[in-house]
Image: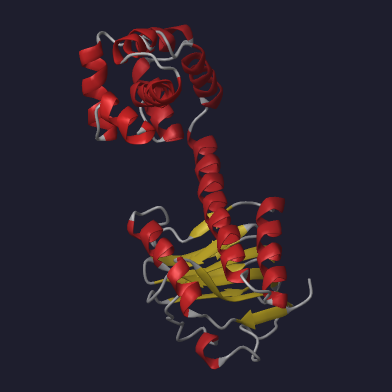
Amino acid sequence: MNNYYKYLPISKVDKSWGLYVVNVGCTKIAKAQRYPPGDHPSHHYFKWEEGRIFDEFQLIYILNGEGVFESKSCPLTPVKPGTLLMLYPYEWHRFKPNDETGWEEYWIGCKGSILQHIYNHHFFPKETPTYYLGTNESIINLFTDVIEQTQSEKTGYQQLVSGMLLHLFGKIFSLSKQLNFGKKNKHEDVINKAMSVMHANINSYLSFEQLAREFCISYSLFRKAFKLYTGMSPNQYFLQLKLNKAKALLLNSGNSVKQIAEELGFESAYSFSKIFKAKTGSSPNYFKKKFLS
């Protein structure tokens, strides 16, 4: 790893985009080396005894080595290779590598209304700012791609790297969910089979109690595991599949609302229309008229 860092100028256009990068870098810290290195700007330098607060989000991926992390909302926590640290605006924090190991780190500092929205909806709680992702090639590639684009600062680069950054946040969320699910639950194969059954029987009625029995698992455990894995109950997931197909049929098939309701296994056109409006905010006929007029 070659040491590199850059603090970036931000235009009004960049800020209006809603997500932008303010600094990037990668650093190899040798055993017993001063941390942070003394050549960083004063507003990003800190002493371990005092810690630090700043006004940006920051992602720090520890590739090799070990250390510790602490913040106002998180007690002192060991950091091992493959851990991502998430720093939050106006949240006191401190971290450092162990003198015996040093470490290699990538980091991206960023701001924007999109990040604030993600944070406000508790996708990344500040009480759990450390994410063990392992040595993940796709995470490394995203960090290095962002760094590469900032080196040249070609026109429009901020909008390009903002897409990479949003991909990175999504990847972190997805990987952490998968790793946590794997630790807590042994039913991933059952859930994947259930999802396949739903896709294959989208025009039918399904009893999820019966489906759970066929998979030799209690319904309550099946429902709990399914919701943990997908964020939705089995009924909600299956209904969403039906409504997505209903939208496609309304726009492309020429079939009536009654025909679509029958095709997708709803009790009646009235029942279908009531559910469709409750979930989408408009009736099937209004939805069709809005997009085809």
Q: Residue at x 66, y 69 (%)?
A: 105
- Residue at x 44%, y 33% (from the top left corner): 230
**Could you tell me which residue is drawn at 50 percent across and 73 percent down?**
14
Left or right: 92 in relation to 94: left
For residue 287, side relative to residue 129 (left or right): left
Quarter where residue 8 is shown = bottom right
Position of residue 243 measured from the top left corner of the image (x, y, whole percent): 37, 24
Please tell me which residue lies in front, 78 or 7: 7
Residue furthest to the right in view is 2
For the residue pair 12 and 104, the one nearer the viewer reads as 12
Between 256 and 25, the one nearer to me in the picture: 256
User: Is 245 located above or below residue 145 in the figure?
Assistant: above
Question: Could one spot residue 264 in this view of the protein?
Answer: yes
On screen, residue 175 above or below 227: below
| Residue drawn where x is 40% and y is 52% of the image | 123
The N terminus, quarter of image = bottom right
Image location (x, y in percent) of residue 160: 61, 63
Can residue 104 be seen from the camera position used here?
A: no
